[in-house]
Image (tube, rainbow, N blue to C red):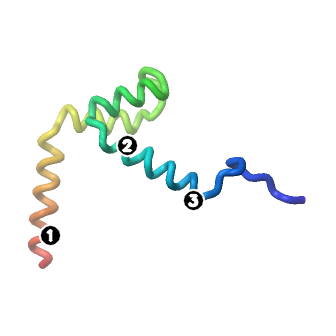
């Protein structure tokens, strides 16, 4: 018996390139646009609970991400 392909006739490379395009497109959106995209794609407040929480946390506390970036720069300088 032969196995059937899970994703039809598309090759692994095609699926990979599509996934990379999707991820870069999503990352290029602003935080509020990312939430709107999730609402559009999945429904308002439905699914992607952890991802929505992370995005909302970044919106509510923007200084935290800036502090983390500065801290990582300091650590990189100390290692050198």
| Placement of the C terminus among the 4 image quadrants | bottom left
**Viewer-nearest of labels 1 and 2?**
2
For marks 1 and 2, give the CA distance. Answer: 29 Å
Horizontally, residue 21 falls left or right of residue 60, namely right
Q: Which residue is mark 3?
A: 13
Q: For numbered disc 1, what is the local secondary structure? A: helix
Horizontally, residue 76 falls left or right of residue 34, namely left
N-terminal label among 1 and 2: 2
Classify mark 3: residues with Cα within 10 Å, few (<14), some (14-19) or many (20+).
few
N-terminal label among 3 and 2: 3
The part of the image, by quadrant, that contains residue 79 is: bottom left
Where residue 4 appears, x then y in whole percent? 79, 52
Q: Which residue is mark 2?
A: 25
Q: Residue at x 31, y 30 (%)?
A: 33
For marks 1 and 3, give the CA distance. Answer: 35 Å
Where residue 45 appears, x then y in whole percent? 42, 23
N-terminal label among 1 and 3: 3
In the displayed structure, 76 sits above or below 48; it is below
Q: Which residue is mark 1?
A: 76
Q: For numbered disc 3, what is the local secondary structure? A: helix
């Amino acid at each position: 018996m032969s196995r059937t392909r899970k994703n039809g006739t598309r090759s692994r490379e095609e699926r990979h390139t599509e996934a990379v395009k999707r991820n870069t497109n999503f990352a290029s959106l602003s935080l509020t646009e990312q939430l709107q995209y999730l609402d559009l794609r999945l429904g308002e407040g439905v699914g992607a609970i952890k991802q929505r929480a992370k995005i909302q946390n970044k919106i509510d506390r923007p200084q935290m991400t800036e502090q983390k970036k500065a801290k990582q720069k300091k650590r990189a300088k100390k290692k050198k």
